[in-house]
Amino acid sequence: MTKQRLEAFSDGVIAIIITIMVLELRPPQGVALESLRGLAPVLGSYVLSFVFVGIYWNNHHHLLHATHSVTGRVLWANLYLLFWLSLIPFGTAWLGQSRAAPWPTAIYGFVLFMAGGAYQLLEGAILAHQGPGSQLAAVLGERRKEWLSVTSYLAAIVLAFVSTWLSLALYVAVAALWFTPDRRIEHGIRE
């Protein structure tokens, strides 16, 4: 099976996810610039989530660029990833409206954790299909960044009940870790 249909569907779903997030933004009640101050938590959660969705889109693009064909297992793994990504707008809205209260901060992290795990499952399904001797397997290596990310999400979930600011700092740190597209694939795969 070719990968083009999977790419097109995934791009469409991710575009809808971003659209839903931006539609959740409401303008301030006042007309002065100060009116935006009350929206800072909502805007902050939107920016962070937009960055995360952008990171997934970038890395998904690179991963599929390095993929020659897909199987049913890859299709289901991709749908599983899209399911968790589709919950980011919910987590974003709750996080912003609650002004980073413990439970919304933890649930936001849980959605990120599950999306991170789902991305690893997608990588694993593609690697299983392409084989351990594939170019992609050699390029991805031990996948340390992926494991560091999901471990950080778990720590941030627990920290949400101690200090939501530390929890949010971990989410930002993971986003910073992945902000540059995955160079392993970009530089390691020959056309």
Image: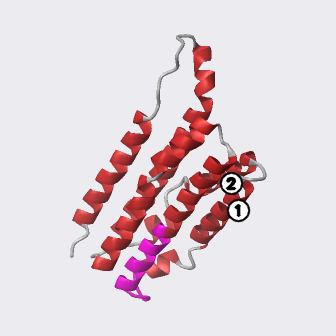
Verify whether residue 120 appears in magenta.
Answer: yes
Verify whether residue 103 appears in magenta.
Answer: no
Under mark 1, the amino acid is Ala
Determine the residue positioned at 29% across, 75% down: 68
Residue in the foreground of this view, choosing between 51 and 82 = 82
Determine the residue positioned at 33% across, 72% down: 76
Provide residue 125's location: percent of width, then percent of height: 40, 79
**Disc number for residue 84:** none
Determine the residue positioned at 49% across, 57% down: 181
Q: Looking at the image, is mark 2 or mark 1 earlier in the sequence? A: 1
Span colored in magenta: 118-135
Nearest to viewer (mark 2 / mark 1): 1
Q: For residue 71, say whether it is visible.
A: no
Q: Secondary structure at mark 2?
A: helix
The residue tagged 2 is 170
The residue tagged 1 is 155
Provide residue 98's location: percent of width, then percent of height: 62, 38
Q: Secondary structure at mark 1?
A: helix
Determine the residue positioned at 54% across, 12% down: 30
Numbered-mark total = 2
Q: Is residue 66 left or right of residue 119?
A: left
Residue furthest to the right in view is: 162
Quarter of image, res 143:
bottom right
